Amino acid sequence: MNLGRAATCLFGLSVALAACGRTDRSSGGSGGSGSAPSNTGGVAGSGARPGESAGEAGMADCASDSPRPGPSPLTRLDNTELNNSIRALLPPGTSEAGLPWLPEERAQNDVMDSPPSSDTVERLHALAHSVALRMTDGRGEGWLAGCDVEAEGEAACRDSLGAEFLERAYRRPLTTEDQEELANAFEMGRKVGGSFASGMRAIVELALQSPDFVYLLELGDGSAVGDAVELTSFETAARLSYFLTGGPPDAELNAAATLGPLSDEQLAAHARRLAESPNGRMALSLFYTRQLGADHLAEVPELGFDADLARDALEGSRRFVDDVLFNGPGTLSALLTEPSAWTNGALAAYYGYSAVGDDWQKVLLPSRSSGFFTQPAFLASTSRSSYVSAVQRGVRVLRQVLCYDVPPPPVEGMTSLPEASTAPTTDRGRLEAETRSTACQQCHVYIDPVGLAFGNYDAVGKWRDDEQGTTVDASGVLDRTEAAGTFSNAAGLMQNIADSVDAKSCFVRLWLGRAQRRPVVASDACVEQKLTRSFLEGGGEILPLLEDIAQSDALRYRSRSELPPSRP
Amino acid sequence: MLRGAGSIAVALPWLEAMAPERSARAAAAPAKRFIGVYTPGGTVLEKWRPIGSEESFELSPILAPLQAMKSRVLVVDGIDMTCAVGEQDQAGLVGLWTGTSQSGSATGYASGPSIDQVLAERLSTGQRLASLPLAVRWGTGKARGLPSPMNIANYATAPGHAPIVPRLDPIQVWEDLFGTSDLAEAGAWDKSILDALGRRYSKLAERLGAADRARLEEHLTHVRHLETRVRAFSSCSRPELVDTTGYDPRAGLESSEGVEVTSPTTDAAIPSVGKLMMDLLVMALACDLTSVATLMWSDTEAKHSLPWLGLRDNLHYYVRGGGYHPEELTQAFTWYVQQHAYLLEKLSQCQTANGTLLDESVVFFGSHIQRPPTSGKTDMPFLLGGSGGGLRTGRWMQNAHRSHNDLLVSILNLCGDERQTFGAAEFCAGPLGGLT
């Protein structure tokens, strides 16, 4: 038996789960952290990056006033953000139907390691082409009707329509260089396509693929604050807007940015306004649902779980999150323990809820539901078939809700197995038999109880009292952790977790990561500590947390070292 | 599966949950294009049929021109056109692409749509043409150049299933499809956009810090790569117009039974016009003008000569009119297969985003009868070509008297249409199967 990996497992986990502090978790001691499978949701990752040492941002530095921004790598708008941004640019009355929108998926925030894919570049090329065609196809009250070419001339219309479009696309005022490029694009399009419309088409098609649109370009306003460079008001506005709405700054936010740097009060006010807007509510609830649940659930034909149900299940959890955040208690605890679910007719029929009619509605399920993680969007995302994977469930909850570092299993340790004939048939029995060895138990002592707490839910989240003829035993104990305690089922487990400090600090990491468009790292420690303290003191209320993030350094600075040296 | 200490293999399903998600074994993407080709006169079965076994066979004399493309064709043998109820020749053409019997009396049309029209609705969405039905030396004999069940193979999907007259004049088709400068521009447009885009990325990259620059440059390589592909895959080009002097597309108007009016100049131009029609067909697909096309080499009458083969009498004479002439027919049928080889080659040379046109197409080649003297319609001379929908070629598939309706169903299935019957239901036993 290879003790090396087992030792890693033991060491990593005991360090990770024994302490409450931030620094322990950031210590790159656990070898497996970098190779976490993609389903942990990169944003709420364990935080340790190869080469990063603990305590880089010691307590002393937090007292200083000088901002110390963490890395701000150039990030691309992800597919959801690109779609939203393009929608926002379509002239009023332009139909979205039939355009080749980009496939949407979980927020791709692990951008330090992931380059843009050729598939995305190609799809964006096709989308930009189709949008440009649609905007200039001359039908009805289109974009081009906004300027009378005959009366004013092509150049004037090119500039008035084109500049307005480009400014909104680039999310900042235009420079002289931009104006030149606009004229060049028009000329090229006019030449090849032979008309004013084709000239305008080229402007749009180029703009929607340009780095100024596709990426959040942040060159700063030139004013240095210690090691940091302050972002322009437009750059901060963009970060804020994409953080909360997944889309570009709206007219109101843009107007504020035009007037000058955004104050704390302004940022907080816009944050609240944007979060509560329809786009904000959708983006926030969608983000949480996709990151903690899934962006896509597999069909399980043998259980009658088809694509429609899968889609409905995700929407049901999204509505739950939206309801908790904007109509309900608005706390993390509520997200984790509220015994309600949102259902439509199809879900109600499948899951046995008592619903009235087919429309989306809230149902109370006091004995069968306890928050997001007892709902199908999460539970079904841990299954690949009709087989329940308690291990997946345990690992996901530990990693994503508590931010515990759970290394992948050591393959060398998996050589001794129970014989098939004696293998028990319940999930619990089978799992206990398979993870019985000391090496496995290093991690499984934590993973298994958590995963098996969900034993009352089958592979697609349907409630079951029995399994293989015996009553489900969902009880367990999770000790030596911040979320320690015994529990008799998932509701009890989620309550323990909701009461813990670790769940709250993990939640802060999730949203701070989202705002910064990359996982939280050691150099974020000061910002993170401040946010976590406020979050704890505020009883875990989520919208105030988002406002706090909006006012933090997260949206305002970039490290000077990331920019080219300024000209003398 | 891992082996336990006692060498008992134990499945570890829970391990699978940790493993990367295995995608379900992906079915091939449905065919994106359909091409139907009709040749008159049937075949000489003993000169058509391969020798050997399904995967290892020799091409017969008539199929010999396909040697270079052998891996891209499937000889579909043992198919009977059972739906062909009606006049001995007409019913064969009526049924060929519709799977229906000749309606009403022996002078009626089909009672359902043809497969190309059905597929046009699925495959040609958003394109300029729903389909491109073409014909060479058409409307001969008793039809006198007018549409009749003797020469119509395409039928509309709308109720009533009106007969569709194929396009006959290659110059007009050329003008219609390629006359304007639109097409040349599509490629030029894309290239210009991508070129300008590439310049934007490289210019901006210079203004960024090192790490950001690297990221932008990565994006730039994808843009450049796309540009190369657009350049490479611009197979769309205007076909070269050849001199078709002497070819009268309406020469059929001059034929009549009894008075055998011929048009030697039109007949002599068949090879060059046929080649031009095939080039037009291929380019219509390559330029994304349509995704469905058919080509008829004459009609069931086939009252035209083949002077380039030294056949001075019309084809119908060699088929039945002057008695059964298998040697001359073999010459003619071999020539049609040679043309078909050209078509397949051209399709295989046109690059698309994911392969070639031939990779993405299903090509169905056949005649309205098998046996010339009797118009017998068992063991029809059918070929499938291409790889669309996962079609597995390079084989001689020997069926046991399956209905050709089932073949039509399977062709639809290859194109993503999942119906289980097509045409007259009483002749359907279920998809042919074995094509992929």
Image: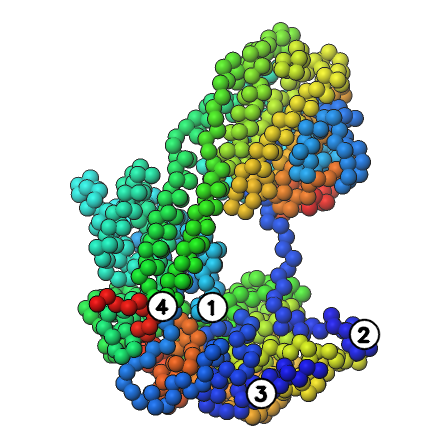
Between A26 and B414, the one lying in front of the other is A26
State the residue at coordinates (62%, 15%). B308
The answer to which of marks 3 and 1 sits earlier in the sequence is 3
Mark whose residue sits in front, 4 or 2: 2
Name the residue located 66 percent from the left edge and 16 percent from the top edge.
Answer: B309
Work out whether A277 lies above or below B433.
below
Q: Nearer the viewer, residue B375 or A29?
A: A29
Find out whether the residues at labels 3 and 1 contact each other: C-beta distance under 8 Å. no
In terms of depth relative to the viewer, which is nearer, B355 or A426?
B355
**Which mark sits nearer the N-terminus, 4 or 1?**
1
Which residue appears at 56% of the width and 78% of the height? A32
The residue that mark 4 highlights is A242
Kindly tell me whether residue B389 is visible in this rendering.
Answer: yes
Marks 2 and 3 sit apart, C-alpha to C-alpha, by: 33 Å
Report helix, strand or loop for mark 2: loop
Q: Residues within 10 Å of mark 3 (few under 14, many from 20)?
A: some
For disc 2, the chain is: B
Cα–Cα gap, marks 3 and 1:
26 Å
Residue type beneath disc 4 = Tyr
- Residue type pointed to by label 2: Ile
Q: Amino acid at mark 1?
A: Asp
Q: Earlier in the sequence, mark 4 or mark 3?
A: 3
Vertical relation: B233 (above or below) A112: above
Instruction: Bin the neighbour count of mark 2 within 10 Å (Cα to Cα): few under 14, some 14-19, many 20 and up.
Output: some
Going 56% across and 89% down the picture, which residue do you hit? A14
Where's the C terminus of chain A, which quadrant?
A: bottom left
Pointer 3 indicates a residue of which chain? Answer: A
Q: What number is the disc on residue B8?
A: 2
Label 1 chain ID: A
